[in-house]
Image (cartoon, rainbow, N blue to C red):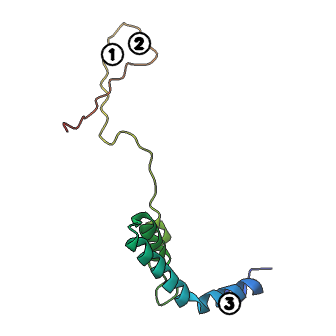
């Protein structure tokens, strides 16, 4: 049995909940705008920014799809590490036993400030 597509793909209660939410969408938007405005008036910029960001990430376009792709809204976090190129220089002498691990010299670029 395959999954139904189109409007029948959701459970009936989920469909009812979506319809109820769709009917209240403008009221919810007004509440978010009110929260943002009150946060700005109280100089609570973190709360205002957080709610504004949520609205931008979840705001639908005319087709009902998100205006900003979810991957753009949540950029990939990369591990911090060296951002400059790493250069490793080694010397090998003939007839001499090589150590198990060659020594590593790290060069760190320090900001003069």
Q: Where is residue 6 in the image (x, y as percent from the top left)?
A: 66, 88
Asked if the residue at tag 2 contacts the one at tag 1, i.e. Cβ–Cβ closer than 8 Å, the answer is: yes
SS for dot 2: loop
The residue where tag 3 is placed is 7
Checking the image for residue 98, the label placed there is: 2
Mark earlier in primary sequence (1, 2): 1
Q: How many marks?
A: 3
Quarter holding the C terminus? Answer: top left
Q: Residue at 18% x, 36% y: name it.
A: 112
Mark earlier in primary sequence (1, 3): 3
Asked if the residue at tag 2 contacts the one at tag 3, i.e. Cβ–Cβ closer than 8 Å, the answer is: no
The residue where tag 1 is placed is 92
Badge 3 local density, few (<14 within 10 Å), some, or many (20+)?
Answer: few
Q: Nearer the viewer, residue 89 or 46?
A: 46
Q: How far apart are marks 1 and 2 (CA)?
A: 8 Å
| 2 relative to 100, above or below | below
Looking at this view, name the residue that lies furthest to the bottom: 23
Residue 10 is at least partly visible in this image:
no
Please tell me whether mark 3 or mark 2 is closer to you in this view.
3
Quarter holding the N terminus? Answer: bottom right
SS for dot 3: helix
Q: Nearer the viewer, residue 106 or 88?
A: 106
Q: Is residue 19 left or right of residue 60?
A: right
């Amino acid at each position: 049995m395959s999954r139904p597509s189109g409007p029948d793909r959701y459970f009936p209660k989920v469909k009812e909940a979506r319809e109820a939410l769709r009917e209240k969408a403008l009221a919810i938007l007004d509440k978010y705008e009110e929260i943002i405005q009150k946060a700005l008036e109280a100089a609570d910029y973190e709360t205002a920014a957080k709610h504004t960001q949520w609205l931008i990430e979840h705001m639908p376009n005319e087709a009902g799809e998100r205006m900003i792709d979810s991957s753009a809204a949540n950029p990939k976090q990369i591990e911090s590490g060296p951002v400059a190129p790493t250069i490793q220089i080694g010397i090998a002498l003939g007839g001499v036993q090589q150590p198990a691990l060659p020594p590593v010299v790290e060069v760190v670029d320090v900001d003069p400030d």
